[in-house]
Amino acid sequence: MQARQFLLASRPTGAPTPENFALRTVELPPLESGQVLVRNEMLSVDPYMRPRMDDRPSYVPPYELGEPLTGGAVGVIIASESPDRPVGARVRHSYGWRDLAIASARETELIPDTEFPLSYHLGVLGMPGLTAFAGLTEVGGIREGDVLFVSGAAGAVGSLAGQFGRLLGASRVVGSAGTDEKATLVVDQLGFDACFNYRNGPVREALRAACPDGLDLYFDNVGGDHLGAAIEQLRLGGRIAVCGMIADYNRPPDERGIKADVFQIIAQRLSIRGFISTDHLALRPTFLETVGGWLRDERLTYRESITEGLENTPTAFIEMLRGGNIGKAVVRL
Ligand SMILES: NC(=O)c1ccc[n+]([C@@H]2O[C@H](COP(=O)([O-])OP(=O)(O)OC[C@H]3O[C@@H](n4cnc5c(N)ncnc54)[C@H](OP(=O)(O)O)[C@@H]3O)[C@@H](O)[C@H]2O)c1
């Protein structure tokens, strides 16, 4: 049997381009004992994949040149050499960027429910959802009445962080996004109290106008000038859950950083904490029960940007980094 899979053909310099990717057809070996063959139905494209394309150590090893890319995927088992993973079972795993995947049973996670679409397990019920939930609760320590600011508010994590924040007790939720259309959608469809387009002027001024009395918790998806502005706008005892720094992902480390009055960290006794979603896997049962309940009760608006066809996976990834997506960016095969 043959599979089609994307390799990292070259490492991007700055923003990735289609030339950094190559689609190859490979012959799959027969399954070994304990393995399954999965027909992928939906693939995830995520910002963290961009830093992994650089040859630099991080919390996950870099992608190897000439090797198949990996990433979140959901699909159906079409052949099995594992008693725990029957043919027909739906699973989530990390062998994305391809149409067919061989995985050992322990590398796959069964998706038992049929209540929600499969793609939700790459988004609201998957890694981005857990990231938003853990970032607000275990990292940001959200409290009743908090004024919450979420950057990347129209994206996968941000759109959920703002809505979860409201349901977890925030009294005011402010967002930022990269177009006027997104900013309007974030307020009208996702229920944020305010959202500004960060491209329309200095973030510091827009944030001050949106939170004139300051803020208590900043859920940071962006870094850079957003992080600097939040440090200056947080009130006494304010907290920052540092989730992502997408503004810097296309830049080398020596060009990253913030320009801000960092003395405010002392004056306002701020807590700034970075986190990785996989540090919070113990929270998953609570997360699934809580967020599953909110979905069932129709208390969440969940958006996806779906790209059709395996061959368009690099385009979906490149466009997501540029802001082409609203909600979770996924590829349907
Ligand atoms: N710590 C963790 O475990 C963890 C887990 C998941 C995600 N993350 C991080 O969370 C952030 C959001 O991830 P996601 O999966 O939800 O992606 P996403 O927000 O759905 O997509 C990325 C978005 O980033 C925005 N963006 C791109 N360049 C930007 C810039 N220079 N300044 C401001 N915004 C920019 C774009 O929206 P606009 O049109 O609004 O610019 C784009 O839509 C990323 O930084 C990611 O690395 C962290």
Image: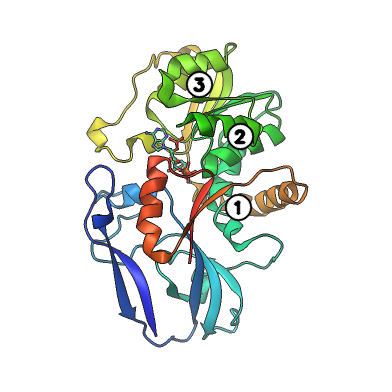
Q: Which residue is mark 1?
A: 282
Mark with earlier residue (2, 1): 2
Q: Residues within 10 Å of mark 2 (few under 14, many from 20)?
A: many
Estimate the x, y position of residue 85 in percent, counting from the top left. Answer: 58, 79
Q: Amino acid at mark 2?
A: Gly
Give residue 265's quadrant in the image.
top left
Which corner quadrant of the figure contains ligand 1? top left
Circle 2: element type:
helix
Identify the residue at image location x=43%, y=33%.
222
Query: What residue would you read off at disc 3?
Result: 270
* Image marks 3 and 2: residues in contact by CB distance under 8 Å: no
Asked whether, in this view, residue 144 is left or right of residue 279, the answer is right
Residue bearing the label numbered 2: 162
Q: Nearer the viewer, residue 200 or 271?
A: 200
Closer to the eye: label 2 or 1: 2
- Type of the residue with mark 3: Leu
Q: Amino acid at mark 1?
A: Ala
* Rendered view: 217 above or below 156: above
Instruction: Tell us which disc is closer to us: 3 or 2.
Output: 2
